[in-house]
Amino acid sequence: MGDKFAPSKGNSGSEKTRENACNNPYVENMSVTGAISESFILKFGEYRVYIISMVFLIAGAIILIYGLIKEGSQVFLLGSLFLILGCWFFILREYYLSRKCKRCGKEFAYVKTRDTEIATEVHSVDSYDYFKCKYCGQECVEKKDVTPGLQ
């Protein structure tokens, strides 16, 4: 993926105009992944979600291999389902970790402050999301490589 939450550097002239475009810095439209992640992490804790994801991934791999050996389509589908669930739990945990403030340590602290910006280079396309901690005010930038064909 891309770089996760690098603290933002000083403002250049173009960044100042982008910063002024932000009307309300603390409005976040919670995504489905965000809402589910918050619910699971608050209920089970980050470590338990990690353990659950590992159990689903290992069980899914074992069931998938067994289904391939025995050529059973139902067993194969069950193994695939377990693998998908394991990956989904990892995504929930990754979302939690990306929204935990690096300075104050509060959970689900980062809120999006600006629209996503797309930067194109000769051979790559990057997206930049701008976040700010709603408790201590630390600003962070999340960079993702969104170049077509490289995912």
Image: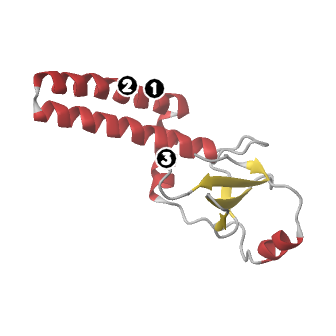
User: Which residue is more in the foreground, 113 or 65?
Assistant: 65
* Residue depicted at x 71% and y 73%: 24
- The reply to whether callout 1 and callout 2 are in contact (CB within 8 Å) is yes
**Marks 3/2: CA–CA distance:** 18 Å
Dot 2: what SS?
helix
The three-letter code of the residue at mark 1 reads Ile
Q: Which residue is mark 3?
A: 37
The three-letter code of the residue at mark 2 reads Val
Instruction: Say whether residue 3 is left or right of residue 81.
Output: right
For disc 2, the neighbor class at 10 Å (few under 14, some 14 to 19, many from 20) is some
- The reply to whether callout 3 and callout 1 are in contact (CB within 8 Å) is no
Q: Position of residue 29 (x, y in %)?
A: 55, 66
Q: Which image quadrant for residue 114?
A: bottom right
The three-letter code of the residue at mark 3 reads Ser
Q: Which residue is mark 1?
A: 51
Q: Which residue is mark 2?
A: 55
**Marks 1/2: CA–CA distance:** 6 Å
Instruction: Say whether residue 136 is left or right of residue 86.
Output: right
Mark 1 or mark 3, which is nearer the start of the sequence?
Answer: 3
Q: Position of residue 3 (x, y in %)?
A: 67, 46
Dot 1: what SS?
helix
For disc 3, the neighbor class at 10 Å (few under 14, some 14 to 19, many from 20) is many
Mark 2 or mark 3, which is nearer the start of the sequence?
Answer: 3
For disc 1, the neighbor class at 10 Å (few under 14, some 14 to 19, many from 20) is some
**Marks 3/1: CA–CA distance:** 15 Å
* Residue depicted at x 42% and y 26%: 54
Q: Position of residue 96 (x, y in %)?
A: 57, 44
User: Which residue is more in the foreground, 50 or 84?
Assistant: 84
